[in-house]
Every structure is written in structure tokens, then in C-alpha cells.
Image (spheres, rainbow, N blue to C red):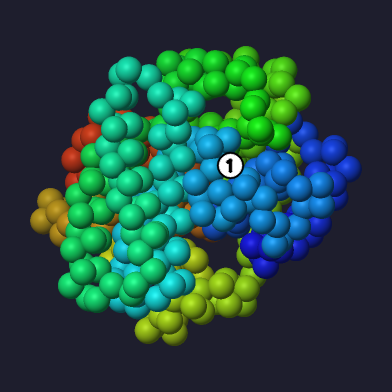
Amino acid sequence: MFNKLRETQPELSNILELEIEKNTFSNSSLFCGPQYSSKMTAAIEVAKTLSCLSEKKGVNCNCSSCIAYDKYIMQNLVVISNRDFENRIDVAIQQYSKNRTDFTKNYLIESVRIFLLSYHNAIYTDKNKTLFETAYEVSELINEFAKNPIELKLREAQRFTKSLQQKLKPLITVSNKNLTSISVDGVRAMQTWLSNTLVNERARIVVIEAIEKSNDSVRNSLLKILEEPNENVYFILLSNNPSRIMKTILSRVRRYNFSQIPIEKQVKILAPFTLDDSSINSFEKFFLSASGIKMNEVNNALDSLVLSVINKREMNSNMLASIIKVLDSSTEDEYILQELLNKVKNEYLNKKIDTKTCKRIIQDISVLYNNQRVFNLPKKNMYENVYRKMMENVNA
């Protein structure tokens, strides 16, 4: 068990394995740590192990549950996530189109099916009926793709990936817009599903990513069902920022801290993708480079913004427009804004920004980014507003 997690987080894999063997694994857990630290991998492997129908749980188990998990067609796992699935699936499509190997094919199938776990019947409501029907069509397309043992020729692969992207588009659009992929109605539907009798199932598992980004109504609804979960019901929360999670929720979960994966391990895991660029030595660089982001240009643009703010010299409209054009050309807004925050924090450590100003800038950037996603505002307006707010704060 935990063969994937053991590659990246060996100590945690031992802890989790022992707890499940001794039946002491908590019904409510929090997996927290930096991005790309295998939290989702761990959650799915925990779910697989808890669901195993064999008395001796092992890596090569062939019970019906483990086979379903190996194919990512399990029915007892719900994933509620707002991660950047668009970029992850685009990367998977690019890698498959380029190599068309069993490895890249399985990686594409896995990426799409994990995304589709957010469209589990457990959280179906009449309001999202159309999206669920689209998710079913995507699932059928992937199922047919998985059944085909023959290596597709280039043109056939291109036709398939084009069809896949078209069918995924409405789902990705909603995913990009929403801060959370579940509503209060969805939480209620999930509560009904969890309370049903478990037939031929050892467990039902709900994985919730970035609960701190959901609205108050959703958080309060989730809190109620976290309080006293049924014996065979498990909640696994994933978070990059556990300090932002409600204390009432933190008090109800057992916490597991995931460390940053060493670069040498990341390079080893990326090896099967046969990357052309030897400088891509981390998961972050892998996803960013595959998404088309020009990291040097973005970094220079952010340096210019920060320098203008630190010196309290407002740049002219033409210069600002050229910088925003660079930032707006990328789909990786969260990465760009995080890099901007890192630069602001460095200026604070260098005592060029005071504590109060630094906190206001961080808060303003978070609010502007959330508003852009919720209301689907033009990104270039968001970046301009970020700059204006930063200038206001240093001149206050």
C-alpha cells in the first residue's frame, strides 16, 4: 500500500499505513503542506486502502475495490477541489500528444478522472444538472479511450484530444470561476449520500481541498457533518494554508504535515515524461513551462512593478500597459500573484516596506484575485488594480 506516496513522503506513508492497520486512522484528517507535496496522492491512496476488501491490504491486491481505484472509477470517493485542473489536463494532453506512450496515456486518463470526481452523484443537484450531464459525456469519452489497447496514430490522437478539450470546456470554465466546487445544496446532497447504508463498501471518503477558500455558508454546512461522521465515513481536508482554516474545523481534525519534496525526487518522478528542457527540475516548473508561461518575462515584469512601488514613482500608462500585457498573456494568475507576494515579502524583510503596509498589500492582492475569479473580471483590470492598490498603500 502507499506505493506512490512512499516515493515522495516515506515517513508519512509509514505513519498512515500503521494507523490504518491498527484501525486508528481518524475519521477527520487534515493533510497540509506546500503545493506539489503529494497531498492529493496521499488522500487517494488512503481512500484506496480504507476501501480494500482484502484482509491483507497490499500493493498488488486484486479485489474489486482496488481494481476500481487503479482505474480511477471508484464510486465511494468524492473529491471537492478548486485546483488548476485546466493546466494539469492541458499538460497531460500535451504529453500524450507528444509521446503517445502507455505512461502518458494513463497519466491523461488519471488527470481527467480525478477532475471528474468533483462530479460525483453524491453532490448532484438539479441546479447543476447540465454540468453533470457534460461530465458524464467526458467520462464516456475517456472510458472508450481507456479500452482501446491500440496506440493511436498522430492524427487520431489529435482528433481525440480536440474532442476531449471541447467537451471539457464548460466544466473547466466553471472550475476556473468558482472558489469552491461545491454549494450549500451540494453539501446537503452529500450528507444524504453519506447517511445511506453502505452496501458492499468498507468506507465512504470525501476529500475537500482548500476549504479555507469556500464561503461561510459552505464552511458552516461542512462543519456540521464533520462534527460526528459515521463510523465508515472519512473526511480528508487538503490545504496549502492551514492557518486560514476556521479554528472550529481545525479542532475536529488530525493533522499531517507534508514537507516539500526534494528536487532529486521530483526529477526522478518527471523522468518518464522525456522532457526536452534539462532546466525543468521541479513539478512547478514542469506545469508552468508546459502551460506556455515565459517565466523570465514574467519575473522581469513583476520586478518592475515592485521597484516602482518601493521607489514611490508611478510608471506612465504606456509602461504599465506593456507590463500588464506580459502578465495577462499567461493563464497562471495564481502563480504570478504568489510570485508578486514573495517579492513584496522580500522587500519587507529588507526593511523597505513596513509591517502595516506589507499586510495591507497582501490582503488587497488576495481580495482582488478572489473578485476576479468570482465575477469573471478581465485579468488586465485585476493587474492594474493590484498595482494601483500597492501604490496607494505605500503612499498612505
Q: What is the x, y in percent for residue 51?
A: 68, 41
Can see residue 211? Answer: yes
Category of crowding for the residue at label 1, using alpha-carbon neighbours closer than 10 angstroms: few (below 14), some (14–19), many (at least 20): many
Q: What is the x, y in percent for residue 183?
A: 42, 22
Identify residue for label 1: 239
Residue displayed at 43% across by 49% down: 113
Q: Secondary structure at mark 1?
A: strand
Can see residue 43? Answer: no
Quadrant containing the C terminus is top left
Instruction: Inspect the image, locate mark 1, and give the three-letter code of the amino acid beneath it.
Output: Ser
Left or right of 151 on screen, residue 263: right
Left or right of 185 on screen, residue 18: right
Q: Choose between 20 and 303: the one closer to the eye.
A: 20
Residue displayed at 19% across by 40% down: 378
Q: Residue furthest right?
A: 22
Please state the total of marks drawn on the protein image.
1
Q: Does 81 sit above or below residue 143? A: above
Q: Choose between 210 and 159: the one closer to the eye.
A: 159
